Image: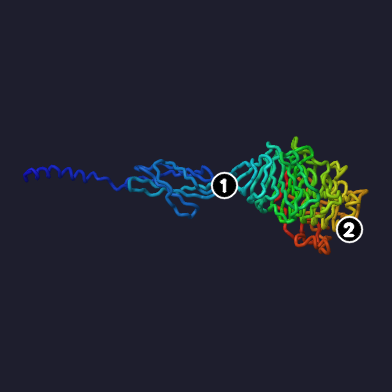
Amino acid sequence: MNVRFRSLLAAALLPAAFVACEDDPADPGESLGTPSGLTVTALSSVSVRVAFTSATGATGYIIQRAAGAAGAFATVANVTATTYDDAGLQENTQYRYRVGATRGSGQSAFSSEASTTTPVAGPRVATISTDVTANRTLYADTVYTLKGFIKVANGATLTIQPGTRIEGDYATLGSSLFILRGAKIMAMGTANAPIVFTSSRPAGQRQPGDWGGLILIGNARINRGNPVILEGTENFASPLNYAGGTNDADNSGELHYVRVEFAGYATAPNAELNSFTFAAVGSGTKLDHLQSLAGLDDAFEWFGGTVDATHLVSYESGDDHFDMSEGFSGRLQYVIAYQSKVLVPRTGAGNVSSDPQGIENDGCAGANCLNGQLSEPFTAPLVANFTLIGTGPGVVDATSGGYGVVLRRGTAGYYVNGVVARWPRAALSLRDGASTGARITDGSLVVRNLLTTDNPALFQAGQLTVDANTNNLEVAVSAAGALFSLLPNDPSTTSQFDWSLSLTSPARTGGLAAFTGALATRAGTVVAATPWRGAANPDGTKWWAGWTIYADN
């Protein structure tokens, strides 16, 4: 190529070069708008939707998120659409968002912030329809439904978190939870977060007998010989036998702040389950702050065993509030029973008693008693600081029952520092001279330092008695309602009671303030003597408040 041609070619290309330089793209951030109209909407407790209006010149968007009012922003997504669903968040947490537009390597300024707070998650649900054969935990964020007779098997431990709700399935007749011999339950409720066993029916429709109940079977001794089939399991393919135990220190676990509501379904005629059943449960088990509400049969029943318990509440029972038999020798302190009516069970669930009673204790009765009503070990509990309030006259039939405390069939034990009021026939019924009378004579049955009022008699007519003066059995002038801070005539008007003693209550004094001799030995470090009577320390906390409830349905 000659020189002249090269010069002409360069001259021809020079304008094109200048044109190319003039058409170079601008800075990528120039003429790039900022997104507007940013909104953030919670989709669930763990996800939100971010939406905004597109920006001029944008080919993409950068989304940043910050947690809380002062959290630092960090990029969570680069998107091309104008909506983005952000998941995997925490419930009940504030999240702030901002959005910037992008094109190439350029980015606009960020938009104004928008925020939302994720809601608290609704409860999860789960069904328990098979036996628990390995360790398992039930969590407070889940509502569990028991379908059928669920058994925690030997060697397994069922742990239940505070605040957990377990429902007995109304449609699956008799749904219950059995803690079998060798198994454990660790129900670790708190005053602020009790564990609740209740009906699967909604509030307002619940009835006594909607489901079965909570049953613990241990390996402690009873006073009946093998076999003894647990009431309510007679029709099981494998009925549950609780006789033959030898370990009075057996450990079935722990129950703390637990409510059992609307239980007591009858698996067969006259075979109602109880709200709480403790069959041969040993002293290694820990029980405190337990409530039964509107159970069809007994609220609390002990068949033998040695387990101690404190702070027990029973509101409205289908039969007896506290029933002990077959050699039970545990210690109970701070016990409340309240009855205002005869319960109406769900259709086909079973029968209620026509005259529920506060305490009904037996020695031994029925098949396989080792020595009839004199069978050993004797039923010999220590029950201290109890408040037992009955219906008063005109509510129940009270032709065979209607007593605050019934001690019969050879029972022994110590019953001290109690309040017994409003029972339609008498405060106390001591029966069976040859057996129970022998326990009075040998000093193993002691009833003393009780305050009674609004009962037509101190003792059932024609039965055993003890000397009222020697044993400090006081018949008060004050009516039952005057003893407490709040004992409503119509309990449906309140969901709480206040068992605190009124300023003028005679129960503030008169308690057995020092235990001596066999009683002191029996009490040990578990039961303390008190100068007051009843379940409420006049200078103490309202231990029943908050975690117990009263409800008709």
User: Relative to 49, is 16 on the left or the right?
Assistant: left
Question: How far apart are the two marked residues, 1 and 2, measured between alpha carbons?
Answer: 62 Å
Query: Which residue occupies the foreground of this view, 413 or 235?
Result: 235
Where on the picture, by quarter, is residue 177?
top right
Numbered tag placed on residue 120 in the rendering: 1
Marks 1 and 2, the one that precedes in the sequence:
1
Query: Which residue occupies the foreground of this view, 132 or 165?
Result: 132
* Residue to which mark 2 is pinned: 442
Q: In the rendering, at what x and y percent does residue 334 appear? A: 76, 55
The kind of residue tagged 1 is: Val
Residue at 74%, 49% (x, y): give it: 278
Q: In the rendering, at what x and y percent does residue 93 appear? A: 53, 50
Q: Is residue 448 visible?
A: yes
Q: In the rendering, at what x and y percent does residue 404 appear? A: 84, 49
The kind of residue tagged 2 is: Asp
Asked which secondary structure carries label 1, the reply is: loop
